[in-house]
Amino acid sequence: MGIKNLEFKNVLFHYPDQSIDVFRDLDLSLGGGWTAVIGANGGGKSTLLKLASGSVQPLLGSVLRPASCVYVSQRTDDPPPTYDHFAYAWDALSCTLHGKLAIGRDYLDRWATLSHGERKRAQIGWALHTESDLLCIDEPTNHLDSGAMGMLVQALGLFRGIGLLVSHDLATLDALCTTTLIISSPVVHKVSCPPSQAMEEVAGQRDSAEAAYRSFAKEMRRIEREKKRRASVAQDVDRRNTKRHIARKDRDAKARVDAFRVSGGDKRAGMLSRQLDGRLERAHDEKSALAEQMRTKGVLDLKKESGGITITGSVHPSRSLLARQGGSIEMAPRRRLYHPPLALGNTDRVGIRGANGIGKSTLLAALVAELDETTVRFWYLAQELGIEESRAAYQEFCALEGAIKGRIVSALVRMGSSADLFLSSALPSPGEMRKLLIAWALEDRYSLLILDEPTNHLDLPSRRALAAQLQNFAGAMLLVSHDRAFLDRICTTWWDISSRDGNDSTLAIT
């Protein structure tokens, strides 16, 4: 009989270039159905999936898994290794998945021209077509528009094996998952409910742990005051119990000391003082345990507000930053994006909306090329960094002067990252890299931010911190996101891109 559960037994793991354990003494058992894996960026979520699927092996301990398992990376640079088996198959499941996920049969041939959202749907379709017993899917909701999100939920709902799903999109996770793992390396906390409910439970546990710690600290201060009082009394008794300073012929004073000793008063005060020594020692141990419990619940609480970041910026002296005549932009061979005249003022907040593959990133790339020829100080955050681009950016960061690097790491910590884990990694996770680029940008005062899917890969506290600070940015913004609530908090003008005549797209200003 095949293995029906996924079992981690006393697992120890860290990467070769790290001195800090990602997991140690990890014991965990997961059965069938989807399990949500949530937590802050860099907390070990992707590593857990790689261990589960066998992509990496534990240093100690073991992982028992079904024979057939698939890991789907959050990166979309390249098609999966056996994607052709799915692309050119015409069995019932392949046809169902191509239809449900709106995957073109020619995706493999034109992978380089696909949007990241289209690539992500293709990855999911391929993974489901393998009919593996264990699926480990990392960040499937990145880059997806609302329509594609619905397709994703429907398709993943077909799976009947053991599934691990990393995502920061709670609606998708709640629709699929009945078990939740909250991870903050090296802590893994399992809760038998959907993630929204699990987050509420952990937030409540954190509040309870903090209240218990405050209450105990108050009681401990009372015990310490009593100990101090008793010690003072014992000192007074010691002074009364000595004949050292009594005149040699003062028999009355010596008699009083003898009577005090006979009564036992010389021992009682010291005994009462010493009784509190053991109590205080036990109290210190209990206080330390409560502090550790409070710390653990704190790092697992994704509802807490992060320390936040400060994005100031400046307003460009010219009222007009960009004026582009109406026309069209080539998206791919025989595909164009048609647009009216486009203008961007020095304080405009423009949200760009549209389905996957409709031309949003293509539009931004064209506008960035024009802005490169102006004096406008702007920062462009691309939708995705390839692995080589990420490695080059991280190496450039590592070579920065110490004080600048320190400020950037401080901003990362305020967004919920662990400085130790970040600095000990040879290449941070995509979420950590996104945070790094944002924190790095805070070193300069820009007049324009051009952000393509800035919330991709970001954990929930970081998303809230970023949205709050973008609202306070002084300059102009061009912002692409499929997170409608995120856009609504920031933008006042909309450029909506929709399909035109099948292949082409058209932009409308609202």
Image (spheres, rainbow, N blue to C red):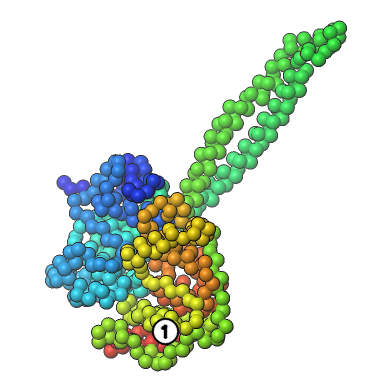
Quarter residue 130 falls in: bottom left
Does residue 14 appear in this view?
yes
Front position in the image: 386 or 66: 386
Q: In the drawing, does residue 12 fall left or right of residue 487?
A: left
Of 48 and 388, nearer the camera is 388
Tell which of 366 and 240 is nearer to you. 366
Image x and y of residue 485, in percent: 46, 72
Q: Nearer the viewer, residue 163 or 382?
A: 382
Check disc 1 and give the amino acid type.
Glu
Residue at image position (26%, 58%) is: 71
* In the image: residue 92, left or right of residue 271: left
Q: Secondary structure at mark 1?
A: helix
Q: Residues within 10 Å of mark 1 (few under 14, many from 20)?
A: few
Q: Position of residue 156 (x, y in %)?
A: 27, 64
Which residue is rendered at x = 78% and y = 12% of the image?
Answer: 243
Query: Seen in the image, is 35 located left or right of residue 203?
Result: left
| Residue pictured at 54% horizontal, 51% vertical | 207
Q: Is residue 414 at all visible to an observer of this figure?
A: no
Q: Which residue is drawn at the image coordinates 33% and 53% (left, top)?
A: 47
- The percent position of residue 419, horizontal first and vertical second, equals 46, 53
- Residue 66, x across and y down, in percent: 21, 50
Count of numbered marks: 1
Instruction: Using the rendered view, name the quadrant where residue 354 is placed.
Output: bottom left
Name the residue that disc number 1 marks. 370
